[in-house]
Amino acid sequence: MSFRSIWRKLDNAFYALTERRRTKRQEKLIEKKSGQLEFASQWQLIRWKFARHKLAMFALGVMTMLFLMAIFAEFVAPYNPRAFREDFATAPPQRPRLYCPEEGRWYARPFVYPIVRDFDEDTWAVTFEEDRSEKLFIRLFVRGSTYRLMNIAFLESDLRLFGVEDGVISLMGNDTRGRDLFSRIVFGARISLSVGLLGIAISFVIGIIMGGISGYFGGTVDVVIQRIIEAIKAIPTIPLWMALSVALPIHWPLLRVYFFVVLILSIIGWTGVARVVRGKFLSLRTEDFVKAAELDGASNWRLIWRYMLPSFYSYVIARLTLEVPSMILGETALSFLGLGLQPPAISWGVLLQDAQHVRVMANAPWLLIPGVFVFVAILTFNFVGDGLRDAADPYSNV
Amino acid sequence: MKDNEHTARPIVEVRGLRKYFESTRGLLRKTVGTVKAVDDVSFTINEGETLALVGESGCGKTTTGRCMIRAVEPTDGKILYSLDNGNPVDITSLSKEAVRRLRRKIRLVFQDPYSSLNPRMTVFQIIAEPLIINKLIKGTGAARDRVAELLRMVRLDPSLMDRYPHAFSGGQRQRIAIARALAPNPRFLIADEPVSALDVSVQAQVLNLLKELQHKLEGLTYLFVAHNLSVVKYQSDRIAIMYVGKIVELAETEQLFTQPLHPYTEALIAAAPEPDPRVARTKKRVVLAGDVANPADPPSGCYFHPRCPYAREICRTTEPELRNLGTPEQPRSVACHFAHELSLQGIQ
């Protein structure tokens, strides 16, 4: 039997299986809904609607994987992100393979060829080549160097998600100092993704307080806050970031710099949230059900917490998800320009600093891979945000 | 028509009510114009009766209703409400706390049941809210019993109380809103166009329900705001017609329909659709030209004169007073210079 026919059979079987599961799931959903729709709270409706948004669900899966990768970075990365092999600076990525052309046969387990370094005596040029005579099989859960998961003492281990037994695997090549780029990207996700979340959390708190005051009480307070927002929005971001980050003392520890960078990003970020919140408050104040509750004798506090906030936090959450990318991009831009985090900190922006030189990019284009991760992360946030927004919109069809 | 057993005792007396909205401009909030939404409106509502307030949109009828519970602060005038013990209080001069207590007795039903119910709360939570906020009931069990009672009163199945508003139709939602209004045992209900957002087919249901409730709950009084005379025809004891912030005619329902005294009333009656084609053929058609006058810049003299088919010179210059033309048994008033001379057409 040829490979092709086996493949077709497998494919058919897989299709039949997923198709059956899909229809089953849909039937279950309809069954569940027909009995429960009337009792469903707004959140349940949003969840059901979101679950039907294919792209958003897919993006949510990718996003979860990215975050799991960031949380368990020590386990996912095959090497310590700071361990270097000077001889193998800018070594190219190794391609995982299943087919060995020399032997003309397929393997069930993916493998890579080891990279060997070659030095040209005349030109002093360093070249890297795959050594086809040897195969390094990729294995799951191999023993590597010891690490502490998230720096917690008792979580010490040497188990890695994947790796090779004798030799080195570098799926995305090495950087200019011979460090494994994939390991560095995995660690960089920690800062790059958390900057987005933390930045959003801070802008959310400031934004909701300022926007809430502005929209609920109105009048002069509103005018003042709106003018402040306009003033902040009018400042060009890059010069502002530059000015603020120049103010960072050089001897500050990494963690403090990190928080300061987040704060810098949030200073701009809260204005957008505040405007959304203000607009929602203004429109909800005139809403009949809020008016009705007011006439029932509800206090300001009760009006805000029981009537107004629940009516728009789903929307605000969707909005916030859509704002995370600007935070991630902001951090990347700052670090790329050398204004935010500096090596030895690892973030996707810091990694991209390596890709600033044309010579490097010509010789080692894989140094742009962190940019791909930024791109994917931002797309997933946008898709999930879109899905949330559609799901939270009571006027879109269920 | 209902007999006038309750007419002896007024529950609310409105005297010279005014509400001016000022439009401001700029940071310093300079006044650039005044909209006289309600301009010197006076009427009395007796306990147990239904007074309808009818007029085109923008004529100030809703604002009048809202002023009566201080949802809108009146600019001027008095609203005398007689308390349970018979003593009158002026609603316009009450303290915040007193207004709060008053709002348990005077309740508002909103026009649009789609926006007046919080989509995040179950029907039980919505109806129990005024009871819980005002601490009128203790314990979830008692609250559930009361809500069930209220739901039965508005002819809804009490087993539906844990559903969310999105599971109900427009008519059902309006019943829920009525149940919420009735929760603290009010004496006076302001129904702000309670059926105009509903399908014609369910309007009658809600209207009948309101009528039935008035019978069941002794002494429940309605102020029924509407823009459609045919809606209030079978509903109200007396009707007040409003035009650009003023009452132009106030009479008992039957009188008003059979023998209108104001040209605007005639036009409104003529505008109500007649279901019987034989009657419709004989009807005189009165089609008003132009739009409702702009309350920010009303015409001189009688506000209605640019649209009035009977207007004469005096109408352009002199504003007519609201005059009492009725008998002591059947009081009625109208604001038209020629109320005596015109013979206007009504319907039987």
Image (cartoon, coloured by chain):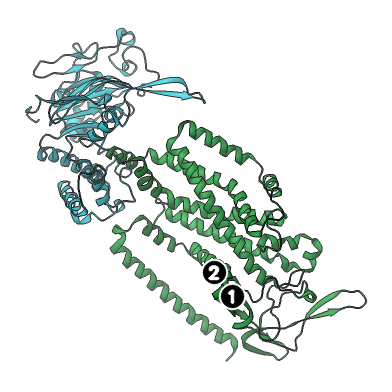
Chain for disc number 2: A
Do marks 1 and 2 share a chain?
Answer: yes
Q: Residue at x 33, y 11 (%)?
A: B301
The residue carrying mark 1 is A75
* Image position of A3 (left or right of B169): right
**In the rendered view, does B5 fall on the left or right side of A2?**
left
Identity of the amino acid at label 1? Phe
Q: Nearer the viewer, residue B7 or A25?
A: B7
Q: Secondary structure at mark 1?
A: helix
Residue A68 is tagged as: 2
Q: CA distance from mark 1 to mark 2?
A: 10 Å
- Left or right for A377, reference B145: right
Q: Quadrant of the N terminus of chain A?
A: bottom right
Query: Is A369 above or below relative to B224?
Result: below
Report x, y in % for residue A382.
55, 57
The local secondary structure at tag 2 comes to helix
Image point (53%, 64%), residue name? A59
Chain identity of mark 1: A
The residue mark sitting in front, 1 or 2, is 1
The foreground one among A35 and B316 is: A35
Q: Split into 4 quadrants, where in the image is the C terminus of chain A?
A: bottom left
| Colour of chain A in the rendered structure image | green
Question: Hey, what amino acid is under mark 2?
Answer: Leu
**First-in-chain label (1 vs 2):** 2
Q: Nearer the viewer, residue B165 or A138?
A: A138
Instruction: Tell which chain the image draws in cyan.
Output: B
Q: Count how many numbered circles sit on residues in the image.
A: 2
